[in-house]
Image (cartoon, rainbow, N blue to C red):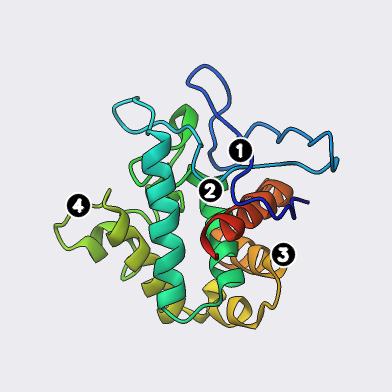
């Protein structure tokens, strides 16, 4: 697990030709020769937007920091906020315009499923929540995450708020909110520590 005190470390870089940082399709982290732990750097994921252009690393960094600050402002601890960011990094590389690689249903930073929480679940979908606004807007998607967490207890806000460590926060959000198949918890935890080190200072 990444626990370096460095503010920034090397992150997984997805390429257009390689594995993208999407739900269940992230390339493995590289082990650090000093620690043997996987090292990641906040803000340098690659992603694929609907028009197939990669999102710039500087935009990813801005998105990560905005999301981290958003959840802290909502009353979550820095560790809990980092746990969310670690999950969102694994799901989408913090690209609100991303579509799941290979034509899957995942959309946006949390990879909500088209045909479900993205556009059709009654009273609980991004499109309805947007009310005609831009569904690919980062702030709208952050607001939707908070709406779901505070409106539906099954999405695990209580577990997230009870988490006292980054690891526990990652797992709470992963298991109750993302409800992923092949979750790759190690990557999520690595991303969360990188976000904490980059943005909690």
Q: Quadrant of residue 160?
A: bottom right
Residue for point 73% across, 49% down: 186
Which residue appears at 54% of the width and 76% of the height?
154
To which residue does mark 3 refer? 167
Seen in the picture, residue 54 relative to 70 is either above or below; the reply is: above
| Residue contact at pointers 2 and 4, CB within 8 angstroms | no
Q: Earlier in the sequence, mark 2 or mark 4?
A: 2
Q: Earlier in the sequence, mark 3 or mark 1?
A: 1
Which residue does the numbered mark 1 point to in the structure image?
A: 11
Label 2, label 3: how many angstroms apart (C-alpha)? 15 Å
Crowd class of label 1 (few under 14; some 14 to 19; many from 20; radius 10 Å): some
Give the Cα distance between marks 1 and 2: 11 Å
Give above or below for 5 relative to 51.
below
SS label for mark 2: helix
Separation of residues labelled 4 and 1 (CA atoms): 29 Å
Q: Residue 132: give x, y in percent of width and height.
A: 14, 57
Which residue is label 2 attached to? 89
Q: Which is closer to the viewer, label 4 or label 1?
A: 1
Q: Nearer the viewer, mark 1 or mark 2?
A: 1
> Disc 3 vs disc 1: Cβ atoms closer than 8 Å?
no
């Amino acid at each position: 697990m990444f626990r370096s005190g460095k503010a920034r470390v090397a992150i997984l870089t997805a390429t257009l030709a390689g594995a993208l940082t999407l739900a269940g399709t992230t390339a493995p982290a590289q082990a650090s020769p000093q620690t043997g732990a996987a090292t990641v750097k906040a803000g340098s994921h690659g992603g694929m937007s609907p028009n197939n252009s990669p999102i710039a690393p500087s935009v990813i960094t801005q998105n990560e920091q905005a999301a981290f600050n958003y959840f802290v402002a909502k009353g979550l601890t820095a560790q809990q906020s980092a746990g969310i960011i670690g999950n969102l990094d694994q799901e989408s590389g913090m690209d609100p315009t991303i579509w799941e690689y290979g034509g899957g249903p995942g959309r946006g930073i949390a990879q909500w499923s088209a045909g479900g929480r993205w556009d059709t679940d009654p009273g609980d979908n991004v499109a309805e929540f947007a009310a005609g606004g831009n569904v690919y807007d980062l702030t709208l998607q952050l607001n939707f995450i908070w709406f779901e967490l505070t409106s539906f207890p099954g999405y695990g806000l209580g577990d997230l708020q009870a988490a006292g460590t980054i690891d526990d926060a990652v797992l709470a959000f992963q298991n109750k909110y993302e409800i992923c198949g092949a979750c790759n918890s190690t990557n999520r935890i690595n991303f969360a520590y990188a976000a904490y080190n980059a943005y909690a200072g």
